[in-house]
Every structure is written in structure tokens, then in C-alpha cells.
Amino acid sequence: MEQLIFDIKQEESTFYNFTTEIPRSWKDLQYYAKSAGVVVPFYHKLTIKKVFTIPTSNFYQLKNKLSLDSFKNHILPMAVRYITKDNVYVIERPPFQLEVDYRLGGAHSYNSKMPPVKIWVPWTVMIFSANSLMNGDFSNVKLYFNSGPLDSLDQQLVTCFYPNTHSDAKICFSTSLNDFNNILDLSQIEQGNIGYIYNYIFNNYMMGGWNSDLSQNLFDNFRSVDQDIINKNCPTISLFLNPTSDPVFYKKLSLVFPKKYFGRIKRYFLDKVNLRSISREKYYARNFGIFAAFTLEQTIDFIKEIQYIISSKNSYNKPTLDNILKNFNSNLVYFDSSVSNPISGIGLVTKILHPSIEYDYLQCKVDLFVINDTEHDPREYYDKQALLPLNILSEMNYKLIDFLNTRQSDEHIAFIYDYSSNTFDVILNYDSKEYIKDIVLSAHSGISQYCEDNPSKPNTYALKSWIMKLDERIEQYQQLAAV
């Protein structure tokens, strides 16, 4: 998670970049400990960077340039359906065909690409802050699917389930926008040409090349729904889950890919295959094969059925357009020293050149341990990149800003967040390697005792094998420590 923070004071204001990272390798320690009934805290790494300082009066002058007047002289894209008072735009696009460019691995891997196929893209709804895009900040662009044109703010939307999108519908552009300054007419950006900006980011995502860096989020829409309900009310989803149930469709599917490649992934289309056990590389390829075999009508029906499932769930915050817009600005935060709480805002200046800016780069890393969290499974927690409540992160931001600006070179702190009470403490004079070593030793002791007390349990052999490499484990996890 990334937050963009302005600490606004009367004379000058400072821009900070705050990121939260969860070391995925820590989950193995927690998983084995949990198997033995031993509790190990969850682990986050916090990084705060001081980027630049600007006189507050100059900052507001620059911010005013991002007002709605900046956009009044340009023709909007044909399908702009809604504009909020904060310049958040909602733009839809009707269905179209797309040739898929997908790499069976990470963005920087040398893995081969999936053979190209053509799919129907359903109605899309892109939501973004025009102010942020004008300043080169693409982190909040969101993309949703719909089964038809928007008809109200109560319209249920479906999070984009193509690669390179997060579970909250944000697009991951990775390095695909590195040429932003080189190939675009920046005068169009500065003048607020929304159509020009929209076409660039939409085409960049759809045709820039996908990879399997991010987990698939499609299955989350119906993983907890009873199969009988799907079979009765959602025939297209049922066909997606079991394409062999329709011989005519399955024959069409078998011709989508070259024969040799289809033979390699054929088993992923069979009845009762465990979709959760498929690697994300193969899962995306499987899905693209089915989408390529879908007609436009089936593609639209697929979205309709997902919307039906979403609407039938008992959720207080369903992904309606209204709810999405209400929550859209929640991760762009201003800090005003004159008030006790952060105030949400839009138009954060993230890419500005001004003679009054002083670049004073500082950085520090802080470890965060989450204790008394008995609700989350370690593997699900890290796979979903679970984060702390926003109010706790906001309080930590204040502590981190103060620490960053006053710390001595050899001074370190850490946070301990108590999940049960939703409070946190600060560890002063924090020795990261010793603290992590104590956690590993405590887990090792607890697991060893469990193995002695339960020699015949099925998991004892695996636990014994894991604790045999104690020194190696300690060294492995100490390397994660913030210094």
C-alpha cells in the first residue's frame, strides 16, 4: 500500500511518500507455528520518504491551477457519464474485441507468451481523478466491468478481472508508463485534455502487455456461492467453471489455441478441477481460452450473472457506482498540523516543477508487528496483502514524520499493533535483529514442545523437519529487518 502525504503548516508544507510492505516469506514461520498452536505476530515493513518542501502559499497557488476551470476548454470523451465536484471522472466504453498479449510469468521474467487469442471485452467503466493524472500520478486509476450502459448511481459494477489489476480495481501499470514524458504531448496533459489522457491510459492498459505478477481476483466473486445456485441461476458462470458440460462449446474452446498448447492446459478445463490449486499463470491462460470461446452475448451474460451474485450477497458496501465514488479518495490524505485528524483531499501535487520547491530527500524504515490477531490465516493474510485500519496508519504517519525529521543516524524504533484493542505502542531503542531472533527462538521452542507432546500427529514430521534448520531460519528472517 502507498500513501501520498502532505504535512501542511502555516509557513511551509512537506510532501512524504509512505509505503507498507508485507514480507511474504514470514508467512511460513507463522504457518508452521500455528500448526503447533504457537502464536507468531504478523510482520509489516513501513517506509517513509521525505521528498520535498514548498512554501504553503505557493502550494495552494499550484493546487488552484488544478481546479475545474483547467478542464473547461476541451471536448470531453463521448462517454463521460459523471464528474464529481473533486474532478473524479467516470467514463464508460462499449464492448470491443481485443487480441490478448499475455506473458506466462512476471513482468521481468523471460517466460514465453501465451499464444494470442481474441476476446470480447464487455462494457468498461474507468474511474480516475483528473487532478492526479494531470500531475503524472496514475496510482488511483480504477477499471470495472458492466453488463450494459450505466443507468444510475446504484449500478452494480464488477472489478476488472484481467491481469495487472488489483482486487480493489486499481490498475497496475508497473513500468509501462515510463515513456509518459517522452511520447505524450505534455501540453495536452497540463491543459487538462481529459479525452487525450483517458485514451492514453486505457489503451496502455489494454494493449501494453499483461503478465501474472498479480493474483487472479475473478474467482472471489463466486467462490463462496453454492454450486446448485450457480447451476440454477448462472448458466454462463457454470459453463465457465465446467466448460466440458457443453460438448459444442468445449469443441469450440479446443480450437482457440494451437493444438499443442491446448494439450498442455487441457486438464484445467476438466470437470471438478480445483481452480484454487492452479498457478496464476495457468489460471489466466485457462480463463482467456474460455473468454475467447465466449460470444459477445455470453460475455455480457457472464458479467450479468456476477452482478446477480454480488447483489444477492449480504454486504453493506456493495460495489455500486455511488459507493465507489464515495470511497474513491480514501487513500489520498492531507495532514494539516492545525487539526487532529487527516482530511481527505484530491489534487495532491505529485509531479510539479517549481523554483520554490526544496528537494530534501530523507528516508527511514520501521518494522511493525501485529499481535493478538487470531482471525486471519497467515497464508490468506499475506496473499491478500491485508492492511491496518486507516486510522491506525494515520496515527503512525504522524509518529513516523516526527521520527524521520528528528532521528539520530543510529536510532531505530518499531511499532507493535494490538489487533484485539486496535491500539499500538512504539518500541524505542529497537534492535531489529535481536527482536526477530527472539520471535524465531520462541516459535522454535513452542514447536519443539508440540512435537514432543504429539509424536504421532500427522503434522509432527513436517514440523520436525522445519525446526531442524534453526540457525538458517534465524538468519533468513533477520535479513528482513529494517535498518
Image (cartoon, rainbow, N blue to C red):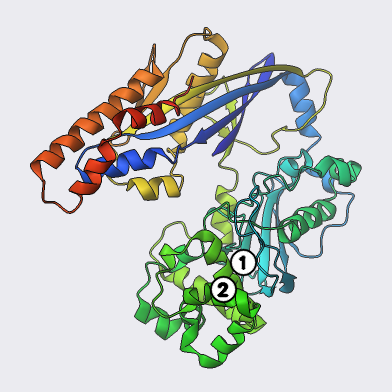
Callout 2, which amino acid?
Answer: Ile
Q: Residue at x 51, y 65 (%)?
A: 218
Of pointers 2 and 1, the one earlier in the residue sequence: 1
Q: Is residue 335 above or below residue 73?
A: above
Res. 256 image quadrant:
bottom right
Q: Is residue 401 above or below residue 279?
A: above
Tell which of 109 and 50 is nearer to you: 109
Tell which of 264 and 446 is nearer to you: 264
- Tell me if label 2 and label 1 are in contact, CB under 8 Å: yes
* Residue 74 shows in this picture: yes
Q: Where is residue 328 in the image (x, y as percent from the top left)?
A: 59, 48
The answer to whether residue 482 is left or right of residue 453 is right
Q: Name the residue under label 2.
A: 303
In what quadrant of the picture does the N terminus appear?
Answer: top right
Callout 1, which amino acid?
Answer: Phe
Res. 54 image quadrant:
top right
Q: Where is residue 451 in the image (x, y as percent from the top left)?
A: 15, 41
Task: Tell me the crowding category of disc 1: few under 14, some 14 to 19, or many 20 or more residues within 10 angstroms, Cα based.
Answer: many
**What is the number of the mark on residue 145?**
1
Q: Is residue 476 above or below residue 250?
A: above
Res. 249 image quadrant:
bottom right
Q: Is residue 203 above or below residue 448?
A: below
